[in-house]
Image (spheres, helix red, strand yellow):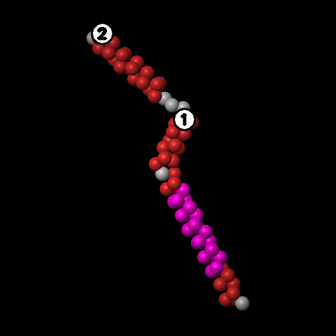
Amino acid sequence: MNNGIKWVLFVCLLTLTMIAGGCEGTDTRERVDDTVEEMTGKKDVERYKKLKDDIQTIQNQQADRYRQLDEGQDKE
């Protein structure tokens, strides 16, 4: 029984050591993630999607403005 408790304590100590050693600062982790995303092209894809959405929004706004102009001219 005593031997079992020693093993449990050993495993707990080992686990705590691994957890403490594996902790990274959030800034470091964010920089690493950012670099990985940049290298794999994920950021470029996200920029492309955002740009595409922005262009769609601008096109919709322009279409609304043209419709308003047409409606204004029809009333005159």
- How far from the left and from the top, in percent, is residue 71? 65, 84
Residue at 54%, 64% (x, y): give it: 52
**To which residue does mark 2 refer?**
2
Q: Is residue 39 above or below residue 56?
A: above
Q: Which quarter of the figure has residue 19?
A: top left
Residue 66 shows which numbered tag? none
Residue at 39%, 20% (x, y): give it: 14
Q: Which quarter of the figure has residue 75?
A: bottom right
Name the side, left or right, on which 3 lies relative to 56: left
Queried whether the magenta region covers residue 57, the answer comes back as yes
> What span is in magenta?
46-67
Q: Is residue 60 above or below residue 36?
A: below
- How far from the left and from the top, in percent, is residue 46? 51, 55
Q: On the rendered image, what quadrant is the N terminus found in?
A: top left
Q: Nearer the viewer, residue 59 or 7?
A: 59
Q: Secondary structure at mark 1?
A: helix
Question: Which dot, 2 or 1, sits closer to the camera?
Answer: 1
Which of the two labelled residues, at mark 2 and mark 1, occupies the earlier sequence position? Answer: 2
**To which residue does mark 1 refer?**
28
Queried whether the magenta region covers residue 65, the answer comes back as yes
- Say which amino acid is labelled 1: Thr
Q: Secondary structure at mark 2?
A: helix
Name the residue furthest right: 76
Q: Nearer the viewer, residue 9 or 59?
A: 59
- Say which amino acid is labelled 2: Asn
